Image (cartoon, rainbow, N blue to C red):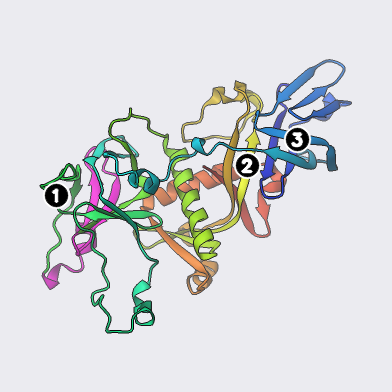
Amino acid sequence: MDEVAVFLEIRQGTQSGLLIIRQLKPESWPMDITLMPSLVELKNDEHCKTINLPPEVRIVPSSCRGLQYVLGDGLHMRLLVQAGFNNTKLVPALGDILKTKKNCTFYCQSCRESVINNRTFLRVLSLPGENWGDLVEEWCCHPNPFNDSVLRPQNGDCFLGHNYFLISSGSDPTGPSSEIPHSESLGTPSRSSGSVLNSKANRRVICRRCKTLLGEVHSSGATKYYFTELFVQPSEEGFDMVPRSPFIQSVVAQCLEELSFARSTFRFSIQGTDGTTYILMWLLNSDTLLVESSGTPACSNIFTVFEHDMSSDLRPLKIQKAIKVLYHPCVKSRNKDLVDSWESDMGVHSLTFPSKTCLELLLILAQSNASLPPSLRWMNSFQVAFLKM
């Protein structure tokens, strides 16, 4: 009975949920299962176990339908669920922090080294989509004013993309944002034609302490940093770093959710800075809330590399916002035909992250997939995973 766990997937839009009572062993039968608005009670002749749901979740017992036992999964049922979620639990979006015009400090997310100290941005502007220059002639009734098609942030500016931000590489001697980024650039890009082949490697920006790739310096004089590599917070606040795995999940999930809303794009190609496609991803649901427990540590066979807290099984269940994705791993030339097909499809949006981060994301997806009930791990030929925010 101690090994019994629950998995509850909630769709906020329809207020419906799939509840699976996992690891029910036949030797524990017969068993009485009682559903109440805030708890699930399991009872047989020898034991009784009560699983308390998070306070934000209220199930409607009378709506239970589709009751069936799935071998290897447990007992499935669908029902109505009323659930709320506090947005303050989410990792705050970088753009939201910067737009407050507070003095901010940027840290390397991998080792917590200070990268940019006490910087205040006077303007925080969103960048247009890629290939925006191709549409300029449709926008303007006079000759193209953007001849070089490059947007250069000035001192005090921060330009936000979907997965990166641009700041001026120069320092501002007149304001508090004048500190030079605490990072290393492997060489200075030369303007001579002979340096073109090596310019990409020479423009990398890496953390001094852990040598993690943080971004790159553009020839235009702007420095590009990836959201997945820097953690930012107001300088006057205490240090409150988010662990690596939850941070990557939240940043990528927010990025996919924003793009799907702004552009009605649901298919994504996750590429590394080395030009390799690592993951093909299809955003399925963005209104998902998850409630899950894993039973006792002894019965768990899921190995987790990132900050797994084995004592979490003993804590009260929590509700987590997540997005549900379908994905194909593409490392070592896997799914090459599908990669070629997606690359030529206008409906697929490409996102670039440091190659190491792409591998971390692939591992996170694989771990999420392995933790799901077996019947939920595949949809058609895609693997299923959740990215928690």
Q: In x, y percent, where is residue 309? A: 52, 27
Asked whether residue 330 appears in the rendered view, the answer is no
Residue at 62% from the left image edge and 41% from the top image edge: 289
Instruction: Name the N-terminal-most of marks 3 and 1.
Output: 3
In screen coordinates, is 233 left or right of 244? left
Tag in front: 1 or 2:
1
Q: Which mark is residue 172?
A: 1
The quadrant holding residue 229 is top left
Question: What is the distance, in whole Å, between disc 2 and disc 3 at their CAs?
Answer: 13 Å
Q: Residues within 10 Å of mark 3 (few under 14, many from 20)?
A: many
> Where are the magenta residues, as a range?
192-221
Dot 2 amino acid type:
Leu
Q: Three-letter amino acid code at disc 1? A: Asp
Callout 1: helix, strand or loop?
Answer: loop
Image spot of residue 55 (x, y percent): 65, 28
Q: Amino acid at mark 3?
A: Ile
The answer to whether residue 368 is left or right of residue 24 is: left
Q: Which mark is residue 301?
A: none
Q: Badge 2: how crowded within 10 Å, few (<14), some, or many (20+)?
A: many
Q: Which residue is mark 3?
A: 59
**Residue 384 percent coordinates (x, y):** 62, 51
